[in-house]
Amino acid sequence: MASRREAVQHRLTQTQIFPFLFVAIFAVLGVVSIFSPLFYCVFPTQPHWHLSSPHCHKSDPISGHRETQVNYGNTNLSHILFGISGSAKTWSNRRFYTELWWKPKITRGFVWLDEKPSENKRWPVTSPPYRVSGDTSNFTYTFKRGTRSAVRIARIVKESFELGLDNVRWFVMGDDDTFFFLENLVTVLEKYDYNEMYYIGSNSESAGQDAIHSYSMAYGGAGFAISYPLAAELFTVLDGCIDRYASFYGSDQKVHGCISEIGVPLTKELGFHQVDIRGDLYGLLAAHPLAPLVSLHHLNYVQSIFPNMTQIDSLKRLMSAYQVDPGRTLQQSICYDLNRKWSISVSWGYTVQLYPSLVTTKDLETAFQTFQVWKRKSKEQFVFNTRPMSSDPCKKPVVYFFESVENVAQDRSLTRYKRFVDLLECNGTDYTPLFAVEFINVSASTLSSETWKMAPRRQCCEVVNGSDLQVNIRGCNLQSN
């Protein structure tokens, strides 16, 4: 009897102890969960070259940067910091391209020079402010046919980040002859989450250049964008990384090498143009990729984009259309006049091509090869398809160039294109009616930047007969082709 009572008491004691054990265990787990972030910050386990945990450090210990961005409002121009590579000796001759797109007191950024400008020359108020790059004499550069300035230029992204400026989401690098189209740049960057690591740009048009340098690299002349978190990571690793790529020719190669070590690939945007081509840029601009026009480069190495004008005046004319409808600039639309069996290709704000026959859309969207490869003696090809521009005037379209633009309604424009009179013109009877068309008018609604957040599709157009040929550009319905 006594043994039975002892067994019962033993079971009761176990029953009473178990609840206390459960309570004690949960209490310990709670304390651990509260203090574990503190332990993580005091005793970090990740290598020093990785971004710190956002719970540990609010700012970078050197420049006071926030490690992450938290404001999810729309990206605008004030969120972009430009880093433009330049030289004190050449800036006065090369600044004019930058000054066409730069907006004083609106755009943010600096021209990074190799030395302080002469005190005898006043820095132009129309130019971006300048900074002098740090000393790079301790870095190694071994490419025999290159210049050491590649090291200095590669460090511009680091030096820009080190400034610690507020409210920067994107660091955009470019050359002193890079021409940016700002609104379209914002449109492109707005598609991406600036809290993530992004490396955005495009490669060269010449396959030979890409084969030598890289197909997966953003070319510096076209410009490239680096998101804040990636810039923060580059800040910590760049100086230690540059010497590993001492044999690389260019600054963009060196930056790409360091970004590759971080593990971030290139996000390609086709509106960045390195322009590693020579001759006449017309064919490329008349059949622009289906993407916002973001940049042009090497404009001193190609013919003026409008005939009988300087390159600067040509850009001013293009900008007059761009300012009315940035997103539509150079966007191609193709339509047909089935009654007269004519084909029409519009590159908005730049040119119209009129054909006396029905040409396939596939041919019309393929660029005329009016240009040559970057290295004239090279057999390299291009990274996009081209078609030959015949020397026979009876096998070429009649070409019209943009002349003027006007707003005809709150969200609608009318652009006017004038026929270019070539030295050699076709005498064929099928061309005679085309030559009677002196002007072509193009009506279009303003292309919303939201369009570029949707699946891409070339807009349609239709021909309206009148005293002047008129084309109406519109969105496509299900039956359009």
Image (tube, rainbow, N blue to C red):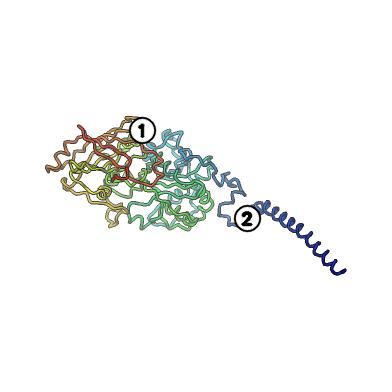
The residue located at (18%, 41%) in the rendering is: 339
Q: Which residue is mark 2?
A: 44
The amino acid type, in three-letter code, at marker 1 is: Asp
The amino acid type, in three-letter code, at marker 2 is: Pro
Q: Quadrant of residue 11?
A: bottom right
Q: Is residue 254 left or right of residue 356?
A: right
Callout 2 secondary element: loop
- Where the N terminus falls, by quadrant? bottom right
Q: Is residue 129 above or below residue 16?
A: above
Q: Position of residue 112 (x, y in %)?
A: 45, 43
The residue located at (32%, 45%) in the rendering is: 478
* Mark 2 neighbour class, 10 Å CA radius: few under 14, some 14 to 19, many 20 or more: some
Which sits in the foreground, 175 or 149? 175
* Mark 1 neighbour class, 10 Å CA radius: few under 14, some 14 to 19, many 20 or more: few
C-alpha distance separating marks 1 and 2:
56 Å
Residue 411 is marked as 1
Which sits in the foreground, 453 or 374? 453
Residue 37 is marked as none
Q: Is residue 125 left or right of residue 365?
A: right
